[in-house]
Amino acid sequence: MNIKRVLAIAVFQLTFLASQAEVVWFDGLHPITYQIPKKVEPVVKTALDMWMGDMQQVTGMRPMASANGIIKVTPNPSLPHDGFRIQVNRGRILIEGGNGRGMAYGLLELSRLAGVSPWIWWGDVVPEKRSRLVLNDDFRTEQQPSVAYRGIFLNDEDWSLRPWSHKTFEPSGKSQIGPRTYRRIFELMLRLRANTIWPGMHPGTTAFFKIPGAKAMADSCGIVIGTSHCEPLLRNNVDEWQVAERGAFNYRTNRQQVHQYWIERLQEVRKSKDNMFTIGMRGIHDSSMEGYQTEQEKFDALQQVIDNQQALLRQHVGDPAKQMQVFVPYKEVLQLYEKGLRVPDYVTLMWCDDNYGYMTRLSNAREQQRPGGAGVYYHLSYWGRPHDYLWLTTTQPGLIYNEMREAYQHNVRKLWIANVHDPKVAAYDLELFLDLAWNINCVEGHTLTNHLAAWLCRQFGQEAGKRLLPVMHTFYRLCGERRPEFMGYTQVELDKQKYPRGLSPVGAAPLSPIEAAQRLSAFQHLMAEITAIRPLVRCELGDAFFAAIEYPVFAAAAMNTKMLGDSTESHRAYEEIQALTRHYNEMNGGKWRYLMDAAPRRLPVFENVHAQLTGTDQPCIMKRDAADYQSATDGVRIIQMLGHSMHAVAMPRDGQLTYEIEIAAEDDYILQTALIPTQPNDDGDLRFSVTIDNEQPVVYSLKEPFRSERWKQNVLSGQAVRNTKVHLHQGHHTMTLRALDAHIVFDQLRIF
């Protein structure tokens, strides 16, 4: 047989086999076709419209409905709530959803498969044009949520989201986050597979239920509306409780008016399908209950409130056991709960972090059996003592992972809410939080960098993403040592008799000249790397790259230079922050004008000032990251992107690490152990021991009273440090660290 004929037949067969091994859902010539039931939930229609817009951007053609569409969307009640399945079946792509949200998530998963980022609008991540879209004929993915309710709390919105909304995106005479803004937020949540929101509620923000069309927007996107820990029964006390009309928000002296206030909202929402009722009571704006003085008085009053709220729900909505209810033991309410408060078992207990990312309490063995389950209220931004962080979002990914994984293992799986002042600024941290809520096994402690790498590559392309990984890894290390907002070494909410506005001024920075120079050099290297990577990014992603990479890194670098450099460098760095911020707000034709504020709350750290270096260099003969151990017992886990080491080591109770060290000369030394400043989330202690050779172990506790000065310094520096005086002879020594309680995470060891 002619050799050319043989080759031609072989090529034909290979081509045929290849075509049989995949399904082409866009061929470059014809619009994508789809089939969907005539009657579907509104959220499916919303997602379909979003998906069609995505496909038009990717392919240049808007998909068309067809009775024989290549993509078929259908309900499948046998799938879990919010879950979906995508599979190739007889040459078609079948999307099945356990409910409307599941169908919506499935459609938007197809957008992801076509290269569309969830941040297509909020991050200006323009998708790449495609001439062909295919799936293998054996493609199948089935996904379901690890956490039932997953979402965000729009909080401290005063310097970002709110001014951008009412001054730029949808101009309004009212100081509000408008309905079009909420629509965009809800669409982002759909893309991130989130289903719950606590709306903005700060002074000056119009209450969600007073904004025409806002609730309808939420319903169309399958978003459940709840309220924060201090807003009972879907009421926004700050904006909705009018003292002049209703009197004091005092349950002791004005109970009838308070009940009527709650009843009005219950009657308004009783026909809604998705409601989330926060129960309990605090002051109008996150303060203790009015009218009660002693702890016993507060306990008795809160118990009466909870009991009466159950009666109100039964009377005006339905069986309270069938309503999604949340009780948040936050601040002093936690002490009242621990005193024996009776919270119905069908109510979800929502545990809180310490405002800086460290969980303070999780469900014990008894609470883990409650049918109402438990939730997490977690801060990715915060306003309050010892210092705000409302500018950039720099929480280390490893901390988010470690705390959320710990929560999940304690059966805290009903509701996860992340506090964000603005979703655009919080992008990566927020997506990681919600990815874990969707699939707790999407990443492990030792694979966290893979998750960040995948995010960077999806946002900015493979080549740029791979180059950016070490840059952002170092950025999270530097910010883990000290957030940009904390570089003034100042505090807020201090004695106003001593400090104007309760704010301490910028003064001493406890860094030596060498430490400061090393920190500034590290930031300079990051900026040089970003400048070199920028040309690798598609030009249409310029704004996306600036917002997610350049602004936070360059602005953080300038903040460090402003504080740690000389006076000339400091002033130049201050002006650099202003210029960067102006550019941010003028990106994309002014789309984001008023979103970025370089000085939230006008705190001293943001002024045109610099600090005086007061630290001294200590000769350190052995610095060891906790992960550089010689041996470890079972259950020890390395957590990437956590701590000053970026490889902190989480240990189970009775877990043990061993280190071998060499000492050059006999002398008295200080052995310094640095740990992640976690909280004893089982309401117990947080102890560990240090043993040198065969000496007696020295036991320490990391447990600190909330808002004590030592706790403040721990959360500001991202480490809790303990020093041990030791006399060491020349030669070889064995050092053993042992966790005596749960939630111990080691970071670094030093010998001075």
Image (cartoon, rainbow, N blue to C red):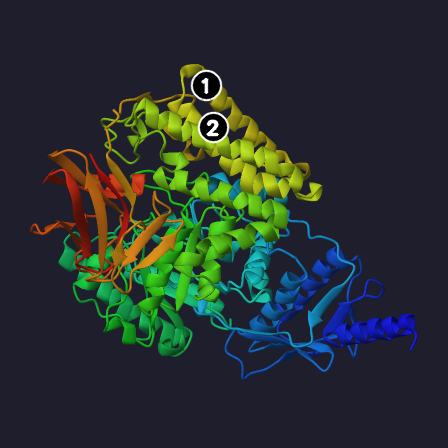
Taking the spot 43% from the left edge, 43% from the top edge, the residue there is 476
Task: State the quadrant of the N terminus.
Answer: bottom right
Horizontal arrangement in the rendering, residue 392 relative to residue 656 (left or right): right
Where is residue 375? Give x, y as percent: 36, 64
User: Is residue 703 something that shows in the picture?
Assistant: no
Which residue is tagged 1?
569
Question: Which image quarter: residue 136?
Answer: bottom right
Horizontal arrangement in the rendering, residue 538 relative to residue 409 (left or right): right
Which residue is tagged 2?
558
Taking the spot 33% from the left edge, 67% from the top edge, the residue there is 409
* Extreme-left residue of the structure: 696
Foreground residue among 585 and 229: 585
- Residue type highlighted by circle 2: Ala
Taking the spot 25% from the left edge, 52% from the top edge, the residue there is 290
What SS does tag 1 mark?
helix
Question: Which image quarter: residue 4?
Answer: bottom right
What SS does tag 2 mark?
helix
Spatial CA distance of label 2 from label 1 is: 9 Å
Disc on the earlier residue, 2 or 1: 2
- Residue type highlighted by circle 1: Glu
